[in-house]
Image: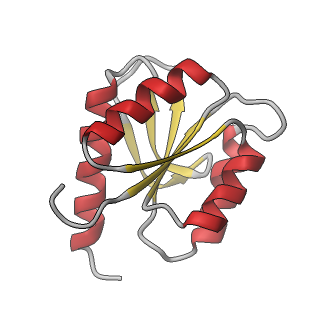
Amino acid sequence: MNETRKKILIIDDEPFFLKLLGDAFSERGFTVLTANDGREGVRTFLEQSPDAVLSDLVMPRMGGVSTCMEISRLAGDSSTVIAMLTSMFKEEPHEHETPEMGARVHIPKSMAPQDIVILVEQLLKRNARQPD
């Protein structure tokens, strides 16, 4: 990632997972923003305009579905990558034609952090190539 530093917002109520994933993105040159729940995540999205958002599915106060749907609404037609992280399924990451539960991409938490970073980098590069 030689171009300008990309910003990633990671929303999760598990401090260990936030640190683990945050460190993986930071090592690849991302500016890492974190939030402990959906409400804080939406606020951080509005204040910081990240290039990508990864949200846990199950969180207190505001769950991942509501969080991703609100961020998607706020992002409008921007090329923001919005992905749902969950331990509720173990399959490979899955991209949907249209957003499902507010996110176009669903990623299992069991995936290695470095692989999550690579996947997000690929999605960001693809979005940058697509015309608005």
On the image, the x and y values in percent for residue 88 come to 57, 19
Q: Nearer the viewer, residue 90 or 40?
A: 40
| Picture residue at 42% right of the left edge, 30% below the top | 21
Left or right of 111? Residue 15 is right
Q: Nearer the viewer, residue 113 or 2?
A: 2
Left or right of 118? Residue 103 is right
> Which quadrant of the rendered structure holds the N terminus?
bottom left
Q: Quadrant of residue 76?
A: bottom right
How many marks do you count on the picture?
A: 0
Q: Residue furthest left?
A: 2
Q: Residue furthest right?
A: 61
| Picture residue at 46% right of the left edge, 22% below the top | 109
Q: Nearer the viewer, residue 29 or 102?
A: 29
How did the renderer colour the structure? Answer: secondary structure
On the image, the x and y values in percent for residue 59 come to 73, 30
Q: Is residue 124 above or below residue 78?
A: above
| Picture residue at 53% right of the left edge, 29% below the top | 18
Q: Is residue 48 above or below residue 27?
A: below
Left or right of 87? Residue 120 is left
Q: Nearer the viewer, residue 91 or 52?
A: 52
Residue 123 visible, this orientation: yes
Residue 88 visible, this orientation: no
Left or right of 32? Residue 115 is left
On the image, the x and y values in percent for residue 25 come to 34, 39
Q: Is residue 41 above or below residue 36?
A: below
Q: Quadrant of residue 14?
A: top right
> Which quadrant of the rendered structure holds the C terminus?
bottom left
| Picture residue at 35% right of the left edge, 59% below the top | 6
